[in-house]
Amino acid sequence: MNTKNISPAAQFFNDNGWVKIEKVIDKDMAFFCYNYIKFAVTRLNLLDEHLGYGNYDIEQWGTFTDDQAPGDFSRYGDLFFDTLMTLITAKVEEGSGLKLIPTYSYHRLYTKGTELTRHKDRPSCEISTTMCLGYDTENLKDKNWNWPMFIGPKNGEIGDTGIPVYLNPGDMIIYKGCEVEHWREPLIGNNHAQVFLHYNEKDGKNNITYDKRPFIGLPKDIFSIKKNYTLEEKKDKDKDQIVYD
């Protein structure tokens, strides 16, 4: 990174591998996003009730079986949040000091007792962001309690206790997702909505525009939304499929 003429946020990011940016979206927009996710949870519960889990496309509607937060609602590549990802690219570039390409969004509604184990991200998430959209703390005496995300050291040293970073709705952390460990301790509030917006360095080693999708708002496997496809199409799909762990 050329550190000349970069923003103070980008300098902090360069020195530490992460930076907090406040008020990326305003509180009204964050409130809309929070309720959008809660409505998506209700919709998926109704699909489960009337159709039975597995009898619909989870990439179209979301899932309750994500390994990182089993039982909680998660969804990959929603068009609304993919659009947000593309529209704030310039803000993430300013905060990181890097030229970026958007890859994918992923949103989740954490619920009481959920934790996020220490991990690093896959190659489509070189520059990751997590944005707080809203939360419910009505079950707590301290209604202003804030659930932190912990960020490990830039050098990726295992065992470090990490730095707790607190976000209000509309605030965001930018971090080097493949290099810096990040995690959350068990949630004690009722729920907490976050959206993860991921990017790669432009012309970098993992130049994976849209996470190898043709465009935003599509699932990772576009064949999953086609009713029937031929054996030859399936062979081509399997041949081209690349899994990033």
Image (cartoon, rainbow, N blue to C red):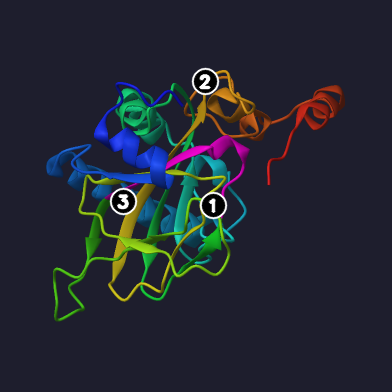
Q: Earlier in the sequence, mark 2 or mark 1?
A: 1
Instruction: Check contact, mark 2 vs mark 1: CB within 8 A.
Output: no
Q: Earlier in the sequence, mark 2 or mark 3?
A: 3
Determine whether 188 is above or below 120 in the image: below
Residue at 18%, 39% in the rendered image: 29
Mark number, residue 39? 3
Q: Secondary structure at mark 2?
A: loop
Question: At label 1, which amino acid type do we have?
Answer: Asn
Q: Which residue is mark 2?
A: 202
Q: Quadrant of residue 124?
A: top right
Question: At label 2, which amino acid type do we have?
Answer: Lys
Which portion, as a residue range, is magenta?
120-132
**Where in the figure is residue 184, as x and y percent of width and height?**
42, 66
Q: Secondary structure at mark 3?
A: helix
Residue at 53%, 39% in the rendered image: 125
Residue at 56%, 23% in the rendered image: 209
Determine whether 161 is above or below 65 in the image: below
**Where in the figure is residue 59, as x and y percent of width and height?**
55, 42
Real-space Cα distance between discs 2 and 3? 35 Å
Q: Which residue is mark 1?
A: 155
Question: Relative to 21, is 214 on the left or the right?
Answer: right
Q: Quadrant of residue 112?
A: bottom left
Residue at 40%, 74% in the rendered image: 186
Crowding near pointer 3: few (<14 within 10 Å), some, many (20+)? few
Q: Is residue 126 magenta?
A: yes
